[in-house]
Image: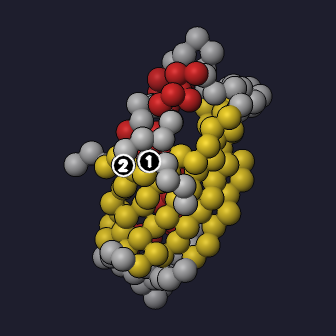
């Protein structure tokens, strides 16, 4: 992962996240990664509701995501989603995400998100948003 700022989000595993065996179902990780990205944006001062309220509304959509599952997580586990903004240019934003249980890496994802208009057309990331996503010190989730 990049040396860019990391946002940390704790996630508790609930019954609804697991399959019949008590192991986290693979699609549940997509929700955890999404929450991590949303909270990392919020911690950087980028709120989806404010993006929608701009004179030219802006939304994000995942364009490409590569995932790797390395170890199982189970019911009642306490995990941590670590999200880093790797690069942002034009209408694209690249992120790297890891999910950890203590010192064990459980899953990782490389994500490309596109910024676009409400009509689904690519839109350049505004300068104020780019500035908020610049590398900096580690960011913790609000407690």
Q: Viewed as shown, does residue 13 lie left or right of 94?
A: left
Question: Which one is nearer the viewer's eye here, 59 or 138?
Answer: 138
Q: How many numbered marks does the figure carry?
A: 2
Q: Viewed as shown, does residue 39 lie left or right of 65?
A: left
Q: Quadrant of the N terminus?
A: bottom right
Question: Does 120 sit above or below residue 68?
Answer: above
Question: Does 117 sit above or below residue 62?
Answer: above
Q: Position of residue 109 (x, y in %)?
A: 59, 63
Question: Which one is nearer the viewer's eye here, 14 or 37?
Answer: 37
Q: Are marks 2 and 1 in contact (CB under 8 Å)?
A: yes
Query: How is the protein colored in the picture?
Result: secondary structure
Give the secondary structure at mark 2. Answer: loop
Q: Is residue 141 visible?
A: yes
Q: Say few, some or many: other residues with alpha carbon within 10 Å of mark 2 (under 14 / 14 to 19 / 20 or more).
A: few
Q: Which residue is mark 2?
A: 138
Q: Position of residue 56 (x, y in %)?
A: 63, 15
Point 37% across, 64% down: residue: 80
Q: Which residue is mark 1?
A: 5
Question: Does 143 sit above or below residue 31?
Answer: above
Point 50% across, 83% down: residue: 71
């Amino acid at each position: 992962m990049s040396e860019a700022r990391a946002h940390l989000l704790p996630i508790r595993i609930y019954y609804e996240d697991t399959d019949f065996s008590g192991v986290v179902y693979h699609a549940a990780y997509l929700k955890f990664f999404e929450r991590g990205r949303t909270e990392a944006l919020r911690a950087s001062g980028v709120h989806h509701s404010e993006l929608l309220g701009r004179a030219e509304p802006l939304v994000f959509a995942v364009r490409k995501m590569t995932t790797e599952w390395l170890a199982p997580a189970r019911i009642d586990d306490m995990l941590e989603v670590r999200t880093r903004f790797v690069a942002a240019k034009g209408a694209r934003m690249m992120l790297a995400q890891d999910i950890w249980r203590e010192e064990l890496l459980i899953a990782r994802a490389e994500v490309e998100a596109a910024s676009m208009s409400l009509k689904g057309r690519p839109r350049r990331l505004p300068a104020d948003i780019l500035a908020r996503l610049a590398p900096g010190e580690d960011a913790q989730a609000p407690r």
